[in-house]
Amino acid sequence: MDFQPLADMTHAQVRATAWEVAVLPFGATEPHNLHLPYGTDTFQVERIAREACAWAAQQDVPVLLLPALPFGVNTNYFRIPGAVALSIMPSTLGKIIADLVESLERQGIRKLLLLNGHGGNELKPILRELFPRTTVFIALCDWYRMVADVQREIFSAPGEHADEMETSLMLAIRPDLVRLEQAGPGYAKPARLEAVQRGWVSITRPWHLLTEDTGVGDPRSATAEKGQRLLAILRQRLGDFLVQLARTPLDATFPY
C-alpha cells in the first residue's frame, strides 16, 4: 500500500479509503540555538509522522496523516533578544484540538494520535478534558520520550533543545538548513533552587535568562548518521504502534 499525507491527496483518493486512525503532528516556530532553523520542531515531527505512517502502509494499514500545526506554546520566549518566537496560548491549543477532534468524529474517524514535537506543548490535560466529551480514542506521544531509552547509546552529549539529538536528526532530514559551524555551546544556567535543579519542582523557565544562544545541550558532535539511526528506531516503534492501534477493535473494553 502506498502512503500519502492528507494534504497531498485528492478527494477521490481520500474517499476511497475507510480511515480508522489519524495522526495530528504538533510543532513550533522558535529559535533553535544559532545553527538550526525556526521550523526545526515542525520539520522533525512531520518527518517522523511520515516515516511511521509509511511503515504502517507497508503492513497494509492506512493511516491518515493530517497537516502539522506549526505553532506551539512559547510564552516564555518573548524576551529573547532579536527572536521572533510565535506562540499560542495553552487554552487556544486546547480549542484547536477540540475542534479537530469534533471534525474527525463527525466523519467517522474514531482513533487519533497526537504526535508532539515541542516541549512547551503540554497536551495531556487536553486529553483529560476531552475524554468525557468525545467518542474518539485519543492517544498522545511526545516523540522524544519514545526514544529516551536509546539516547545515551547514540549521543555523547544529551541535552534538551537544539542539542546533539535534534541537530543530528536535522542533519539526517534537512541538512540544507543546518549551519553547524555557527552553533553555540548550548550552555544552560543552573537554577539557584535545588528542587528545581533536581526536577522535583517545575517552573516556567524564562528562556532569555536560561541560555545565551537559545540552545540547551551541546550540538557540536552531531552527525547525520546518528540522526538516521534515531529516525529508524522512531519509524519502527511509532509505526508498530499505529498498526496495533488500527488493528485493535474499538469495543466496550478498549484499550484493555
Image (spheres, rainbow, N blue to C red):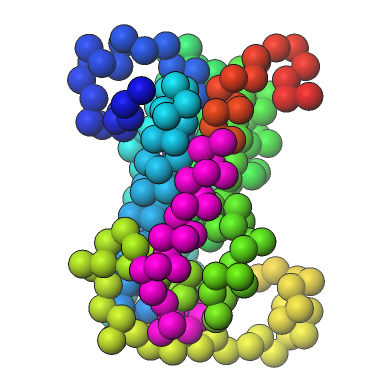
Determine whether, in the image, residue 78 is placed left or right of residue 114.
Answer: left
Query: Magenta segment: does it hold 225?
Result: yes
Residue at 70% x, 69% y is: 202
Residue at 39% x, 35% y is: 54
Query: Magenta segment: does it hold 133?
Result: no
Determine whether, in the image, residue 11 is placed left or right of residue 74.
Answer: left
Q: Is residue 99 visible?
A: no
Q: Position of residue 223 (x, y in %)?
A: 39, 74
The segment highlighted magenta reads 215-240
Q: For this rendering, which residue is in front, 177 or 154? A: 154
Looking at the rendered image, the quarter that the N terminus falls into is top left
Q: Is residue 64 visible?
A: yes
Q: Magenta residues: mostly which secondary structure?
A: helix
* Rendered position, 88 above or below 13: below
Residue 214 image-quadrant placement: bottom left
Q: Position of residue 179 (x, y in %)?
A: 26, 78
Determine whether, in the image, residue 38 is placed left or right of residue 199.
Answer: left
Q: For this rendering, which residue is in front, 235 or 110? A: 235
Q: Position of residue 212 (x, y in %)?
A: 43, 88
Q: Position of residue 136 (x, y in %)?
A: 58, 21
